[in-house]
Structures are given as C-alpha cells and as structure tokens.
Amino acid sequence: MDILILNGPNLNLLGTREPHIYGSQTFEDYFEGLQRQFPEHRLDYYQSNHEGSLINRLHEVGFSFDGIVFNPGGYTHTSVALGDAVASITTPVIEVHISNTFAREAFRHHSFISPNAKGVIVGFGLLGYQLGIAAIISGQLANKK
Ligand code: CA2
C-alpha cells in the first residue's frame, strides 16, 4: 500500500523541545523505524508549517494513495480549509495526535478535521502513527464518509 504520513506546523521540532509533552525522539528517527516495521508498504513522509502546502499535499496524494495518517498540529483547532481538504479527497485519513488533546486546554478539544477523518487516535505518543498505519493496512476502516 501507499501511505502518506503528514505532519503539520511545529512538528519539525519533535525531539528537540517540550519532551514532557511530545517525547524526545525526532520524527526522522521514528520514521526510519516505521519503514523497517512496515517493509512491504511504501511510506511517504511530509511535514510543513504552511497550511496551503499541507492542502496541496492532500490534493496530490488524496485520490491515489491507500491512506493518510495526518497530524495537523495546531491547525486541527483552527483550519476550516484543512477540514474541507480532508472532506474533498477520497483517500481515507486517520487523524493522529501525540498528546491527549482532551486533557489539555479547552481550545484543543475541537477539531475541524475529525468529522471527515475515518478515525482519530489521541494521546498515545508516537505509537499513534503506527496504530494509524495498522488501521489502514487492516482494511477494516468503517464505511462512513
Ligand atoms: O498532540 C499533538 O499531536 C498536537 O497535534 C500537537 C500540536 C498541538 O497544537 C495540538 O493541539 C496537538 C502542537 C505541535 C507542536 O509540536 C512541537 C513538538 C516539539 C516541540 C514543540 C512543539
């Protein structure tokens, strides 16, 4: 399968700042492990701090890839445009958050992405990305959306 891991703003800082919330591993290191863990699948990784670039990437792969594991970062709680982009593509999107957003500030409790995601994984650290990939590979995604 072709699967995109898509990370939004500030997630390029993983492993360098706020390790008590986001852990101490860089995403590049983690991604190498992911590729070793799923050798029979093609994993692609893209990170951007720009909303339009994330939308462009969703449009580029969103009609041909088998799944997208998407952590929209802070745009989760603000971006109608990213929510619209997820709604407009046919590739299933799994929304992932490293931290438990529901145990944090109230503004993190709402997501513009979730209504159009196939599923949401919250609060399991980087493991959430593996769980998202496993869900896509399983082919057991619910048939809504
Ligand atoms: O928990 C998550 O994965 C979040 O999507 C992370 C976002 C936050 O705005 C969301 O509410 C929840 C923030 C990403 C910031 O990433 C950093 C990583 C390391 C150091 C500093 C920031």
Image (tube, rainbow, N blue to C red):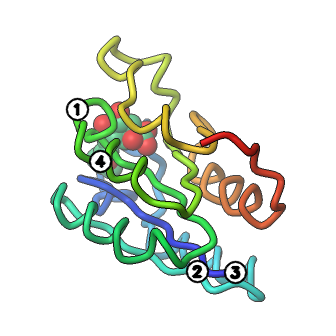
Q: Earlier in the sequence, mark 2 or mark 4?
A: 2
| Amino acid type of the residue tagged 4 in the rendering | Leu
Say the numbered circle drawn on residue 68.
none
- Beta carbon of the mark 3 residue lies under 8 A of ligand 1: no
Q: Earlier in the sequence, mark 3 or mark 2?
A: 3
133 sits to left or right of 92: right
Q: Which residue is mark 2?
A: 43
Viewport quadrant of the N terminus? bottom right
Label 2 Cα neighbours within 10 Å, binned few <14 / some 14-19 / many ≥20: some
Q: Secondary structure at mark 2?
A: strand
Q: Which amino acid lies under the numbered mark 2 shown in the image of this protein?
A: Leu
Alpha carbon separation for disc pair 1 and 3: 31 Å
Tell me where residue 52 sits by quadrant.
bottom left
Residue at the image point whose x is 53% and y is 78% from the top: 64
Q: Along the horizontal axis of the image, is 57 left or right of 87? A: left
Of circles 1 and 4, which is in front? 4
Residue 78 marker: 1
Nearest to the observer: residue 107 or residue 26: 107
**Ligand 1 falls in which quarter?**
top left
Q: Mark 4 highlights which residue?
A: 82
What's the residue type where badge 3 is placed? Met
Residue at the image point whose x is 34% and y is 11% from the top: 106
Cα separation between marks 2 and 4: 22 Å
The mark that comes first in sequence, 3 or 4, is 3
Q: Position of residue 71 (x, y in %)?
A: 43, 50
Horizontal side of residue 66 vs 93, given as left or right: right
What is the number of the mark on residue 1? 3
Dot 1 surroundings within 10 Å: few (below 14), some, or many (20 or more)? some
Helix, strand or loop at disc 3? loop
